[in-house]
Image: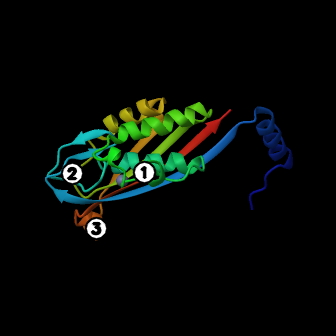
Amino acid sequence: MIRVKRSSAQNLARLLRKTEMKFRVGLGHDTHRLEAGRRLVIGGVDIQHDRGPVSHSDGDVLLHALIDAILGALGWGDIGEWFPDTDEQFQGADSTQLLEEVVKKAHAEGWQIENADCIVFAQKPKLSPYKQTIAEHIAEQLGVDTDQVNVKAKTGEKVGPVGREEAICAEVVVMMLRS
Ligand SMILES: [Zn+2]
């Protein structure tokens, strides 16, 4: 059994009250169907591939999951409420600009992103050559250092919609801080 010293817990509670630092955690998930001959953008970076997402916007699965994670952390609903896919102005929208809008609002309310942990699920192409560039692009948008953004890539093990290259998915967890 793990025993936590009562005094340590009390000290931590006192410290948190004193600093009035607030923490929020958010989770985002997104999926797009893939079709041949479409542009593939992941995390704001153009990826060379023979297929890409079917989407009203640019279909950036990773930025959509990230936006949802930030909105979720702050209790601000979801990406569909902010940028409806029925709205003409978001036809072919650059998701980096959508992220920028959400981050600007978060900063205006005093929230900073502490870190983002991201996973992209795609059978192809191999994303390892792009991971660093994607992390740098996202870090720049969030106003944080590159080591505060982690990008992981998984295949679908050749099973399911991802494995059969019918879909691409992403999941993101963010921690937000307000001091
Ligand atoms: Zn999406």
Q: Is residue 161 left or right of residue 109?
A: left
* Image vertical order of residue 85 relative to residue 142, above or below: below
Q: Nearer the viewer, residue 160 or 108?
A: 108
Find residue 12 and report its horizontal and vertical position in percent: 78, 41
Q: Give SS at disc 2.
A: loop
Identify the mark at residue 65; answer none if there is no mark: 1
Near mark 2 (Cα within 10 A), the count class, few <14, some 14-19 or many ≥20, is some
Mark 3 residue's CB less than 8 Å from ligand 1: no
Q: Which residue is mark 2?
A: 125
Identify the mark at residue 161; answer none if there is no mark: 3
> Which one is in front in this view, the residue at disc 1 or the one at disc 2?
1
Q: Quadrant of residue 92?
A: top left
Q: Is residue 160 visible?
A: yes
User: Which quarter of the rendering shows the N terminus?
Assistant: bottom right
Mark 1 residue's CB less than 8 Å from ligand 1: yes
Q: Mark 1 to mark 2: distance in Å?
A: 19 Å
